[in-house]
Amino acid sequence: MNRKICILVLAVLAITLGLSTASAKPIVAVFAKGMLKPDLQLQWLMGNITNVEWKLFSETITYEDIKDSKMLIVVLVDVDANFTQEEIDAIVKWFNDGGKTLWLCGDSDYKGGDFKRIPAMNTIAEAVGTVLRNEHTEAVDRGSNCGAPYRVAALIRPDDPFAVVASGITKPVLFHGPGIIVAYKDGKWYALEKEVPENVYCIAWTSDQGAIQESVKPLPEVHDIGYEGKLVIMAAEVFPDKKNIVLYSAEAPFDHYRGMWTSTYHDVELDGPQFVVNIIQLGAYPDTFWTYYSKLTAANKQIAQLESQVAQLKSQVSQLESQVASLQSQLTTYLIGGLVVGLIIGIAIGFVVGKKKKS
């Protein structure tokens, strides 16, 4: 009897623990360095995304503060605050645990002080090992904007693995005075609209009427002053070995002058809130992404193998065609040679026969 009771108690305890574990919400930490109080956009953001547990830090962070967080969003609210080495080390240690999503929020080189965010965020980017960088310049868009070229209405056109972040998106997203996201790897700078390093994927773009606007030195690392064309203003890098993701946007979901969490701006309808929700869901619940990524990677590998086989077969076909052409050429030569020999023999025979008739 006692044994049955013990088994029942253990079963109930196991179910209870299982339910409590299953119902635990992933933690999303926000490091809004220098924020005095949450702005309205951050309040709306945290108030509307309720399937995660929010932790907000505005002064400093330690590894202990963020170690259980699935996702970390870093925004430099006070441009003069900067990040300490201890804070950067804490972020690196957290990231190296694996299974993490880090969202870095950069800015443009606007002279009002925004430019100070660029080196601060790039320092963290370099420390965690991503190749993504915030270029020291500003993107404007004369084609897709909210009443002025610097109020960029970004086009959410993610590369395939990140298609989920465009779910439900039919309108652009506000990137108010954004910078540009580029990459730096092995001493080489990459303009992502032209070439991307391995494991890097583009997410948000200007239209084809995007352009460079330079405000504060140094000059842009990648793009020439006067460049016009589409530009990448948000990208991601994945680290499959540890299942880590770095998201780097040239604007922030809240704060700065006006964050992405905006549904209408200067009479332009936007999908900012839905986009931010999608990004948070990706970071807080990454298992679906990684399952899809694994299948996509396997499929792409298989396609590459098949394409290689097709290329080899084409090469073999080309070689066979060349051999056939050579044989045809030789055959033609032989036929012509045989015809000439036949004519000579025919003439000779005719000559001999003719002589015999005369004699």
Image (cartoon, grey):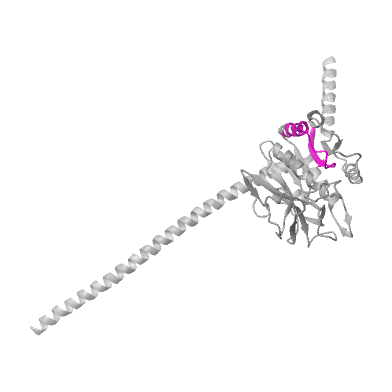
Query: In the displayed image of the protein, which residue is found farthest to the left?
Result: 359
The residue shown at (72%, 55%) is 231
Asked whether residue 145 is in view, the answer is yes
Closer to the camera in the image, 344 or 72: 72
- Total of numbered circles in the picture? 0
Side of 244 relative to 274 (left or right): left
Q: Vertical placement of 141 versus 95: above or below?
A: below
Residue 19 included in the magenta stretch of the image: no
Asked whether residue 105 is in view, the answer is no
The residue shown at (72%, 49%) is 218
Residue 340 placement (x, y as % from top left): 25, 73
**Quarter of the image containing the C terminus?**
bottom left
The residue shown at (86%, 34%) is 59
Residue 116 placement (x, y as % from top left): 79, 44
Q: Quadrant of residue 19?
A: top right
Query: In the displayed image of the protein, which residue is found farthest to the front?
Result: 217
The residue shown at (11%, 83%) is 357
Query: In the displayed image of the protein, which residue is found farthest to the top?
Result: 2
Residue 76 included in the magenta stretch of the image: yes
Q: Which residues are magenta?
A: 68-95
**Quarter of the image containing the N terminus?**
top right
Residue 173 placement (x, y as % from top left): 82, 54
Query: In the displayed image of the protein, which residue is found farthest to the bottom?
Result: 358
Closer to the camera in the image, 316 or 241: 241
Q: Vertical placement of 168 versus 124: above or below?
A: below
Residue 141 placement (x, y as % from top left): 78, 59
Closer to the camera in the image, 75 or 118: 118
